[in-house]
Amino acid sequence: MDILRGDRLGKPAAEVSDYTTSIAADVNIVKPVIEINKAHIVMLAEQRIITDSDGALLLNALNKLDPNMKLDPSLEDVHMNIEAEITKMVGENIGGKLHTAKSRNDQVATAIRITLRQYLLEITKNLIALRRALLKRCAEHLNTIMPGYTHLQHAQPVTLAHHLLAYYDAIERDTKRLMNSYQCVNLCPMGAAALATTGYNINRIRVAKLLGFDGILENSIDAVSSRDFAVEAIAAMALSMTDFSRIAEELILWSSVEFATAEIPDEYASASSIMPQKKNPVVPELIRAKTTHVYGDLIAAFTILKALPLSYNLDLQELTPHLWNTCQITLNSTRMLTGLIQKTEFNAPRWLELVSKDFSTATELADILVRKFNIPFRMAHRVIGVLVQRLSSEGKTLRDTTPKLLAETFLRATGKRLAVKPSDIAEALDPIRSVKSKTVQGCPSPSEVARMAKERRKQIIADEVWLRKKTHSLKKAELKLCEAVEGLSKHALQKP
Ligand code: ARG
């Protein structure tokens, strides 16, 4: 007999049960659902709601379940599959007690949180690895001068280390957002039952502790109907993917023959079926494209929630696959990007060549006029603008500026005379000197970038400590649950 529909509803048409089942996504929560059942049974026995002996029989059966068990879609979901399996193993007299004082509604919300927190820890670990890779490459390129861009036009010289550290900082904030979302995820809905708790004298705190949660979701209606924790996590991952996609875009651009400033590793590229010369940057292209799936997941999750009346509605079942999709894409993309960052070859001479043939130190030159000759910045900006216009129309670069040319331009633009020495302007014409002369906090000079990188190493260590603490506390709870399960089994054997 169908233990859910019983005599109340007949057997559903196959196409209806195919339409309503959540089995495809439930493969992500089989193990958590087994663990939740164990914690719940331990609590029911401790509270004398079921006998130790019934508890022991149920726990022994739960212990025998394989987390990779085959799930039958005609039973709707993993929750009913597990109950049906246990009932098959121990009979209805015992198996029929498994679902005392709980509902699929609190159970599914709890299971999703358990799987999600594992994903969050795993992704955090991988984000830390990515940050380590970025800091390593940063240390190698403290003196690699490159043009910094605004509007994708050469703006001012920076270093590749400075640019990579900008990536790092974005990823560090992404890690923080995931870590913050963990706090909201790691709360336990169990005991809310369908929506209104239960008349049995259950102990919600005990179940939460056995499952490694930091606390309970107190209001039972909120506990079964809220999925903001999932949206928050998806949003945090959507921001990570946005940062990955921007980095991927630059790696693609830099791999072009026009830039020729980076070469991605062969194993992250693909060939053309017709053009023998091609090396296509397919991994960064797919990071860029997969980001859009995550945005889709985010908007789908928001949209499912926005007009949903309290408390549980089956609409919530449709949100969960979006969560797993985002988690898996983000995890895989983090790993791909780490490999790319570790193994991409950056072409320092090419960067220098690009920055040496441009006007990217023009701001420096204007600033020197301000500092040395005490003229307003706006006037200096105008003079150098005229100079750039003249040089570029003659096919020259800023490097071709001479004191004579500058004085002439100054006279033409302002009607005033200026006595410039070569040493006055040398620093402003050399991109390397220009970068090294900067001293402001956060600037591209090698010493400042090295200082920033050193600070960030400390943050990595702090985040690793957080990760270890969370992992350890989940392991501890797992052991406690095992002990409680074993204790009850033994106890019951003595007093059958
Ligand atoms: N399969 C459901 C889900 O994933 C579990 C809860 C179903 N609850 C219900 N009352 N039909 O959300």
Image: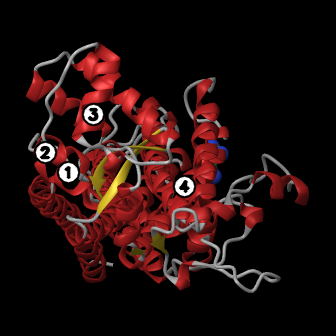
Q: CA distance from mark 3 to mark 1?
A: 22 Å
Q: Which of the numbered marks, if any, corresponds to residue 283?
A: none
Are circles 4 and 2 on residues that touch, CB within 8 Å? no
Q: Nearer the viewer, residue 478 or 390?
A: 390
Q: Is residue 75 above or below residue 58?
A: above
Going from N to C along the chain, the mark reached first, 3 or 1, is: 3
Going from N to C along the chain, the mark reached first, 2 or 3, is: 3
Q: CA distance from mark 2 to mark 3?
A: 23 Å
Q: Which of the numbered marks, if any, corresponds to residue 438?
A: 2
Spot occupied by residue 270 in the image (x, y as percentages of width and height): 65, 80
Are circles 2 and 1 on residues that touch, CB within 8 Å? yes
Q: Is residue 303 above or below residue 481?
A: above
Numbered disc in front, either 4 or 2: 2
Q: CA distance from mark 4 to mark 2?
A: 42 Å
The amino acid type, in three-letter code, at marker 4 is Thr
Q: Nearer the viewer, residue 374 or 422?
A: 422
Please name the residue shown 64% across and 44% down the image: 296
Mark 2 residue element: loop
Mark 4 residue element: helix
Question: Badge 1: how crowded within 10 Å, few (<14), some, or many (20+)?
Answer: many
The amino acid type, in three-letter code, at marker 1 is Val
Say which residue label 4 marks. Answer: 326
Q: Quadrant of residue 134?
A: bottom left
Say which residue label 1 marks. Answer: 435
Q: CA distance from mark 4 to mark 1?
A: 40 Å
Q: Nearer the viewer, residue 102 or 394?
A: 394
